[in-house]
Image: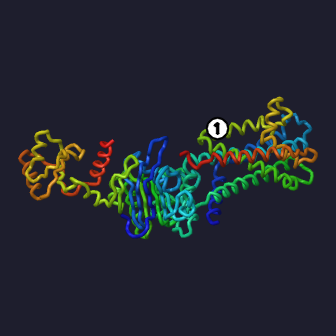
Amino acid sequence: MHALVAQLAMELRLTMRRGENLVVTLGIPLLLLVFLANVELLGNGAGGSSRLDQLVPGILCLALISTGLVSLGIATAFERGNGTLKRLASSPLPRWALVAAKTGAVLSTVVVQVVVLGAMGTLLGWAPAGGPLVALLSATPWLILGTICSAAAGLLLAGLLRPEATLALANALYLLILLLGGVIVPLAQLPGPVATLAGALPPALMADLVRGALTPGAAAGPGEALALGGWTVALLVATLATFRVDEG
Amino acid sequence: MSGPASPVIEVRDLVKRYGGRAVVDGLDLAVAPGEIVALLGPNGAGKTTTVETIEGHRRPDAGSVRVFGLDPRRDAARIRARCGVMLQRADLWNQARVIEAVRLFAAFYPHALDPGQVLEQVGLGERRGARYRTLSGGERQRLALALAIVGRPDLAILDEPTASMDVTARRTTWDLLRRSRDDGASVLLTTHLLEEAELLADRVAIIDRGRLLAAGTPAELRAGGPGERPRLEVALRTPLEAQAEADLVALPSVVATGAPPAASGRPGVYLLPTDDPGATLREVATWLEARRIVPLALRYGAPSLEEVFLRLTGEAEADR
């Protein structure tokens, strides 16, 4: 227990000290939220509250993708490439405690993101039915599932690729998801084949589910929940099957 | 070989192959409680593969490995709770501070030492607040050593612990490891430094190409084997010509062994095996004086571990 607490404290400390990660996990989502809430760009011209109803869930999903896929993926890839993971694996720290500590750090980051982005959305005029707090709580299961799915994808990359390749690919995927993932730009505005493909992938599924929970009348179907659950299980299985603490 | 107590590490007939090539090829090794054993060998001898197999990171292709009588892979958790490890290459997080890293690893063990004190002992006391990113190679290695010993382990497995340390840090490390040993811990370390093996280890295992060439205390290794009789070592500023060299070796009290007198491998250094050092010393002095040669050094004694090592690894080379 002592070991788990110490490792979790270290993970949280590192999360706060990785400045470049804070840019991706908080800076970019905040900037996009403020920018897109004020600029008529995505054709969701109804303005005001309904534009934010569309935007806030997407920004939240982008934020947890940045935490799981980009931040966790890149940090873990470097820990693996530098031998840090192997050093920890040689210590008495149990494997489960390391996973739990990292999970704790990721979930803490997501909580901070949801609070900060929810507060900024509210400041900008986001007013979901029942108030932001109730709305966000009702979306919690999907936010958690989305976080696990993103984290599994990040760890899969970190286990398969060299650190530099993970860095490049995770950032490229982030940009693709931002532009074409059906997260920020509604699927309806993407070219047909792109929309069809993106609609079957985790980012759009996450965004739909979170949007459904936050916005009355936009409820997502159980098919989407099943699909996201399936993706998450598949990514976790692939990660567990391929991840090694070192390249040897 | 390892006394009455059951060994802390016992390796029998270990084989580890990579792509069909045997990197470790039938190795036997034992470490008893409270002893420092050095695994000495040239680069690529299989030292790292051996210790990583003992640490449970690699699966043996044949043979058996036991640590505290347990299987390094099946019983990894129980073994790691009693082990401190120093990997050959393992960096920590750039953003972490030195003292934070030591405190973290101290938290992994039930009876850890005081983190601040351990940092003082490895000579990093003044760097305790520094970020890992800012440490030099030698400082990183000292921190890695601190992480290996802070948990007061029963067994420390150290892969080239002093490779990038300066001379002072190396001496400090040896003192620390001797103190751990005196407190009852066992230490297995790899090194390619003969001096380290000779001055630090209670027993030395010389390996090359994955095979054990010799094992014993440094004194046993120096004295062991045919032709390892004491010799007078004559070091000259300039190497002798062939005729003069033949004359020197033919001095009456020098024992003919068949080995070439320049077998030291160093130009201008001649090894004269003798059973009567006083006579040989007089003869050599007269011989040098007649030729007006002032020697750089005259040394009488058993062969150095370096000579034994070069002979053993040289023989292994010739056998192939």
| Residue at 29% over, 54% down | B305
Say which of A19 and B39 sits in front.
B39
Q: Which residue is mark 1?
A: A168
Residue closer to the observer: B71 or A151:
B71
Q: Can you give x and y, in whole percent of width and height, for residue A44 in the image?
A: 88, 36
- Identified by mark 1, the residue type is Ala
How packed is label 1: few (under 14 Cα within 10 Å), some, or many (20 or more)? few
Report the residue that reaches farthest toward the right.
A217
Residue B8, picture quadrant: bottom left
Residue A150 in the image: state x and y as whole percent. 73, 46
In this orientation, does residue B136 appear? no
Question: Is residue A181 placed above or below B294 in the rendered structure?
Answer: above
Q: Position of residue A152 (x, y in %)?
A: 70, 47
Q: Residue at x 62, y 59 (%)?
A: A7
Q: Is residue B102 left or right of residue B2?
A: right
Q: Quadrant of the C terminus of chain B?
A: top left
Chain containing the residue with disc 1 = A
Where residue A245 sits: x, y (%)? 58, 50
Viewport quadrant of the N terminus of chain B: bottom left
Measured along the vertical axis of the image, is residue B145 above or below residue A190? below
Name the foreground residue: B146 vs A48. B146
| For residue B313, side relative to residue A94 (left or right) | left
Q: Where on the picture, by quarter, is residue B229?
A: bottom left
- Left or right of A242? Residue B51 is left
Q: Is residue B184 at all visible to an observer of this figure?
A: yes
Q: Is residue B112 left or right of residue A131?
A: left
In the rendered view, tell whether residue A162 sits above or below residue B100: above
